[in-house]
Image (cartoon, rainbow, N blue to C red):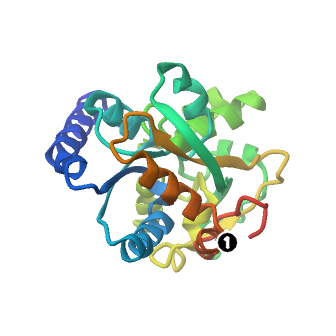
Amino acid sequence: MKSATRFKFFSFLLLLVLSIGRVEANHELLIYSGITMVRPIAELAARFETKEKIKIQIIQGGSEDIYQSARKSRLGDIYFPGEPSYREKYLSEGLLGYHRLVGFNQIALFVQKGNPKKVQPKLTELLRKDIAVLIGNTDSGSIGLETKQTLERFKLYDKVVTNAAFMMPDSRAINASLKKGEADLALNWRATAFFPDNKPFVDIVDLDPSIAEPQALLLIQLTFSKQPELARKFIDYVASPEGQLVFRNYGFVDAEGKR
């Protein structure tokens, strides 16, 4: 994403957060969720609303962008990044508190339906000159960060960046571009291939787990939450057997490693 475009997006996201700051006064919850996990979180939030007779607002975006929105606004209750290194990176700032493991993200190669280019389960396929390649941007979303970390382990990142046709801000943008036929191959979060609006258009080529290491999904309470007990209760609910079943239904690996 070009810097000016990303600045406009981030400014819009921050304004959106500030505009719904009223949730703080109404004993409701505000959740910042990475795009990849928003569907199971939205379903569980709806169930939790019914159980607790409350309202839950969800802000979705790239994991970096939504953290910066929470940091600047000091509004909200829960942060849900798509990659555990965001917690490690920002823990010293003191905004990230109680957390629980609620599942795992894992990358895979994404191809057009039927894999017409006969892509093999190897990272070096991203260097092929006969296909258009997409990867995520490290500055905005968890898939970009995970892509960089994975490819750097095999000394491929700079070569893949040079070969890529586009760098996309998040997992949703990657899938949208593939569905439009703008590319043949991408690295993306595996679970998104199973979403109903993506499944008819894309297939996955799974990489060996030694290459595509599962990444912990941590649901994290923000330390400035005005409803800390309610936020913690929701986090525990997502980690419960009911919550874990919902995550499996959306194609994620649950906290115990079950699909």
x 55%, y 33%: residue: 86
x 85%, y 46%: residue: 210
x 45%, y 29%: residue: 95
Count all numbered tags in the image, as a single digit.
1
Residue highlighted by disc 1 = 241
Image height of 114 relative to 70, above or below: below
Q: Nearer the viewer, residue 140 or 5?
A: 140
In the picture, measured across the screen, residue 53 lies left or right of residue 220, that is: left
Q: Nearer the viewer, residue 99 or 125?
A: 99
Element type at mark 1: helix
Q: Residue furthest top?
A: 92
Q: Amino acid at mark 1?
A: Pro
**Which of the image's four quarters has the N terminus?**
top left
**Which of the image's four quarters has the C terminus?**
bottom right
In the picture, measured across the screen, residue 22 lies left or right of residue 183, that is: left
Give the x, y percent position of residue 39: 46, 67
Look at the image and tell me whether residue 164 can be seen: no
Image height of 52 relative to 58, above or below: below
Find residue 155 and report its image quarter. Answer: top right
